[in-house]
Image (cartoon, rainbow, N blue to C red):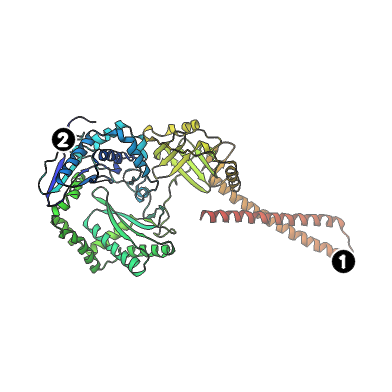
């Protein structure tokens, strides 16, 4: 706790007859966490909700990038008492339920790397819902401190829509920053060149861009949704669902995510049409299409009690430090959007795009984004016994060679180090790359060695204890044999990793190997040329000797020299030719494998 002082947050009110609605909006979200602390906001909210939940209570909560929202519907008395009890629970967090709520959140955790993580990495706005790595590392003191600091009155706005202005008792900790909300985390630059393709997987095709959070973006989203629905649903029947959703980042920038579910048998054609349809919006949009999109969006303004309808959005804008337009101003801003505005925004935002496609690659004219693609490190090598993989650990980081794939995480770019009780570790880079250290899967890498090589290089605040019910077991003999055969079938010296009896030098020998290979090919070619010449010369001498034989001369000494020399040159020619062909074939095979 930052102190025992309790204060009331700012309260927004709008009169509306009928069922009452109210809520609390806090300026805290996923972007305020790190991967090592991810999930702490969701856990605080879960603990507070547990204290107020009742049968039949209509209450919901959501944690976004920078805003957390709790909403309650019902009678005036129920809304007032629920919001009151919620603030009391936040001021005195019921941490005795931490284990139960942690387990519940842990079960909903996902290992999927979201689209935003491919854009920004495992940090700030790249942290998405379902990433709860830090749940087990948060102590009771951490939770109370986060609640007192981030769920404070200065960091909150309450809203209430009902028949009459309520007398709300919403006592929250005063907070440490006076009356100002916590500053927004800056939106970072993308961690890779864009546009790009993110190998997230799944049956959907998704195109996500970042654009200014302006009314034109709403019109663009509706134009895109209608165009895709017409082409992919009505005309072709390739999908049953098309969506276009806008997500707030920092109040100034937002994401536009356009998606469609695809069937496997038509996924390739549908993906092409999906991108072509969106791409055409960069060059031309019919005025009638923009008018139809505007009319659809303006329907919301025909609803009664506009002031009440926009209260939650207004509360978020207040916390984000953005202007709060009136319903009339909102309507006018959408009505003023032109086709030229839509085309301009579509063209500018295209360059920020990330594509998720269920088939192929190269759809966006770019390469598929990869993780852990940094320079491989130099250090000690440890072979896995269950698969054809080797981990190289040095002072700068670690590189995992899995077959022909290289994944590198540098300690200076660590997002979190997951530490398991059995000594296993998972090193996670800011770009989402992962390198596992499992002592049971190595003959020469035990838990103390892992701690010595890895833990000491990672800052303590990034080491997260993570329990697991079933640690990986040592593989059986047949699995070990299979891994050995796979390793034996692959060249030891490949892609810059030189393995020795117990050490590895990574990355430094690649250029030398390529140069040596080139010199070897040239030398073999010269030997081949000389051998061919020698064979031909021996043949000529043999013909001369045969001619002398016909003339009655018998020079047996010359024959004794010509025949062995000719046979030797012919043998050298054959062997050298086979060597050249073999080297060329290996290079071709490697090129095809790399492709």
Res 48 → quadrant:
top left
| Of the pair 30 and 476, the residue shown nearer to us | 476
Residue at 84% from the left image edge and 65% from the top image edge: 547
Residue 7, disc:
2
Residue 156 vertical position relative to residue 228 in the rendered view, above or below = above
Q: Residues within 10 Å of mark 2 (few under 14, many from 20)?
A: some
Examine the rendered structure and indicate whether residue 180 appears above or below residue 540: above
- Residue 8 x/y as whole percent: 15, 37
Secondary structure beneath dot 1 equals helix
Give the vertical position of 419 relative to 18 (above or below). Answer: above
57 sits left or right of 261 in the view: left
Secondary structure of residue under mark 2: strand
Residue 537: give x, y in percent of width and height.
75, 59
- For disc 1, the neighbor class at 10 Å (few under 14, some 14 to 19, many from 20) is few
Residue 347 at least partly seen: yes
Mark number displayed over residue 550: 1
> Which mark, residue 582?
none
Out of 131 and 401, give the one closest to the viewer: 131
The quadrant of the image that shows the N terminus is: top left
Outermost residue, left side: 164
Residue 19 in percent (x, y) is at 16, 50
Q: Relative to residue 365, is residue 219 drawn left or right?
A: left
Residue 4, located in which quarter of the rendered image? top left
Mark 2 or 1, which is nearer the eye? 2
Tell me which residue sits at (23%, 36%) in the image: 89
Residue 75 at what x, y percent from top left? Answer: 16, 47
Residue 484 or residue 404, whichever sits in front: 484
Q: How much space separates mark 2 and mark 1, taking CA atoms?
A: 123 Å
Residue at position x 90%, y 64% in the image: 552
Q: Residue furthest front?
A: 55
Q: Residue reaching furthest right?
A: 552
């Amino acid at each position: 706790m930052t102190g025992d002082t309790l204060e009331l947050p700012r309260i927004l009110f709008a009169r509306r007859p009928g069922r009452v609605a109210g809520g609390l909006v806090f300026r805290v979200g996923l972007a305020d966490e790190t991967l090592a602390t991810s999930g702490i906001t969701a856990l605080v909210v879960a603990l507070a909700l547990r204290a107020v939940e009742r049968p039949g209570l209509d209450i919901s909560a959501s944690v976004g990038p920078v805003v957390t929202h709790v909403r309650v519907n019902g009678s005036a008395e129920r809304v007032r008492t629920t919001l009151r009890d919620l603030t009391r629970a936040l001021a005195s967090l019921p941490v005795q339920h931490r284990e139960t709520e942690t387990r519940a959140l842990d079960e909903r955790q996902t290992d999927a790397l979201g689209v935003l993580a491919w854009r920004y990495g495992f940090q700030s706005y790249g942290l998405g819902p379902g990433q709860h790595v830090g749940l087990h590392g948060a102590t009771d003191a951490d939770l109370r401190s986060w609640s007192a600091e981030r769920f404070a009155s200065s960091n909150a706005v309450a809203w209430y829509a009902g028949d009459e202005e309520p007398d709300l008792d919403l006592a929250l900790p005063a907070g440490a920053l006076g009356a100002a909300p916590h500053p927004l985390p800056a939106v970072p630059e993308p961690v890779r060149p864009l546009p790009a393709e993110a190998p997230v997987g799944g049956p959907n095709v998704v195109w996500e861009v970042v654009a200014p959070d302006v009314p034109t973006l709403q019109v663009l989203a509706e134009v895109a949704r209608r165009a895709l629905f017409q082409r992919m649903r009505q005309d072709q029947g390739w999908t049953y669902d098309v969506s276009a959703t806008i997500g707030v980042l920092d109040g100034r920038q937002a994401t536009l995510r356009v998606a469609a579910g695809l069937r496997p048998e038509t996924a390739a054609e549908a993906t092409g049409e999906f991108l072509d349809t969106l791409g055409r919006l960069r060059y031309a949009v019919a005025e009638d299409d923009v008018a139809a999109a505007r009319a659809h969006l303006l329907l919301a303004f025909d609803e009664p009690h506009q002031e009440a309808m926009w209260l939650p959005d207004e509360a978020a804008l207040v916390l984000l430090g953005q202007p709060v337009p009136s319903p009339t101003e909102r309507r006018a801003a959408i009505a003023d959007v032109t086709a030229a505005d839509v085309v301009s925004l579509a063209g500018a935002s295209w360059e920020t795009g990330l594509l998720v496609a269920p088939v192929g690659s190269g759809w966006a004219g770019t390469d598929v984004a990869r993780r852990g693609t940094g320079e491989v490190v130099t250090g000690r090598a440890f072979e896995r016994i269950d698969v054809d993989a080797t981990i190289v650990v040095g002072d700068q980081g670690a590189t995992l060679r899995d077959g022909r794939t290289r994944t590198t995480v540098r300690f200076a770019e660590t997002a979190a180090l997951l530490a398991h009780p059995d000594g296993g570790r998972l090193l996670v880079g800011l770009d989402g790359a992962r390198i596992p250290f499992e002592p049971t899967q190595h003959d020469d890498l035990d838990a103390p060695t892992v701690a010595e090589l890895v833990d000491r290089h990672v800052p303590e605040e990034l080491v997260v204890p993570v329990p697991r019910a079933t640690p990986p077991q040592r593989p059986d003999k047949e699995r070990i044999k299979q891994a050995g055969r796979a390793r034996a079938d692959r060249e030891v010296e490949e892609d810059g990793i030189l393995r020795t009896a117990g050490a590895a030098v990574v990355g430094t020998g690649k250029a030398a190997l390529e140069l040596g290979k080139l010199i070897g090919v040239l030398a073999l070619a010269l030997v081949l040329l000389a051998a061919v010449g020698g064979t031909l010369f021996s043949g000529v001498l043999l013909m001369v000797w045969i001619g002398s034989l016909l003339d009655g001369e018998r020079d047996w000494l010359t024959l004794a020299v010509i025949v062995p020399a000719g046979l030797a040159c012919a043998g050298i020619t054959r062997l050298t030719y086979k060597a050249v062909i073999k080297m060329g074939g290996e290079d071709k095979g490697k090129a095809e494998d790399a492709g």
